[in-house]
Amino acid sequence: MNSTRRKLLTKGASAAVAAFFCNGKSYATVEDIHSVLDPPPKRDNNVGDEAGIVKLFTPEIAENGNSVPISVFVASQMSAEDYVASVLIVAEGNPNPQVVTFHFTPLSGEAKVKTRMRLAQTQDVLAVAKLSDGSVHKTSNHVKVTIGGCGA
Amino acid sequence: MAKAKARIKVPKTASAGEIITIKSLVNHRMESGHRTDKDGRAIPRKIINKFTCEFNGKPVFSCDLGTGIAANPFFEFKARVMEAGTFHFTWIDDEGIKIEARKEIDIV
């Protein structure tokens, strides 16, 4: 029983330490997210996903922020004229919000990727897709993080 | 550091025009630069910042990684195969160390 209690205390302490270190970092804003897009869309330009072509799959609750499985899918024909050029994954609450940028070509066949990311805290994860015609679509999911991956 | 080892899963054969699934995993600590050691010194950032996949010299998929990717970066993605050939995978880290792997695929 003692050892269980100790384990619990250690976990609590490391979570507190993680929270302390992570809070010292500056967080991203929507402007930051837009500035990392290349070429950046106009700020007031409604970057939305009315067509619903971007799908982002994340767990509702991530128990371990050090490795959170995510999956993104963009509906597209992936032909030579009409394909998904890139998809950007942004974690607004991470010290470095720009997590990863995927680049596709018509040879990709399907714009679908799975990977594992770090999440420092409970936050929104965004997926921004840029198509070959220059249009930008985005979607976001809220992920609750139990123990943050501080080194995000 | 242990030698970086890449593990890749590509089907051995496919029919022409088929969209196949490729899984890749490489051993890497992906040190984010935000952590400190026990003396309080910052551990320098060392991550894989680029991953590319080419098929017969033509780009298929690539990505720019940030510090938000978990250790031992894993990617599962798709590729359309029109002809037999070789997939060439490359990972490049902050120190310029390159990890390479190749996989062949046949058309049936």
Image (tube, rainbow, N blue to C red):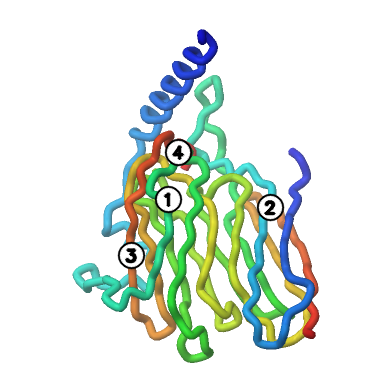
Do the CB atoms of the residues marked 4 and 1 lie less than 8 Å apart?
Answer: no
Q: Which label sits in the foreground, 3 or 2?
A: 3
Q: Is residue B6 above or below residue A72?
A: above
Residue for point 33% across, 46% down: A123
Which amino acid lies under the numbered mark 4 shown in the image of this protein? Glu
Find the distance from the CA under tag 4 to the CA under tag 1: 9 Å
Secondary element type, mark 3:
strand
Task: Tell me where residue A133 appears, x and y as whole percent.
Answer: 39, 85
Residues packed near mark 2 inside 10 Å, few (<14), some (14 to 19) or many (20 plus): some
Which amino acid lies under the numbered mark 3 shown in the image of this protein? Thr
Do the CB atoms of the residues marked 4 and 2 lie less than 8 Å apart?
Answer: no
Residues packed near mark 4 inside 10 Å, few (<14), some (14 to 19) or many (20 plus): some
Secondary element type, mark 2:
strand
| Residue assigned mark 3 | A139
| Residue assigned mark 1 | A59
Find the distance from the CA under tag 3 to the CA under tag 4: 23 Å
Find the distance from the CA under tag 1 to the CA under tag 2: 23 Å
Secondary element type, mark 1:
loop
| Residue assigned mark 4 | A63
Q: Is residue B104 above or below residue B94?
A: below
Q: Tell which circle, 3 or 1, labels the residue nearer the N-terminal end.
A: 1
| Residue assigned mark 2 | B26
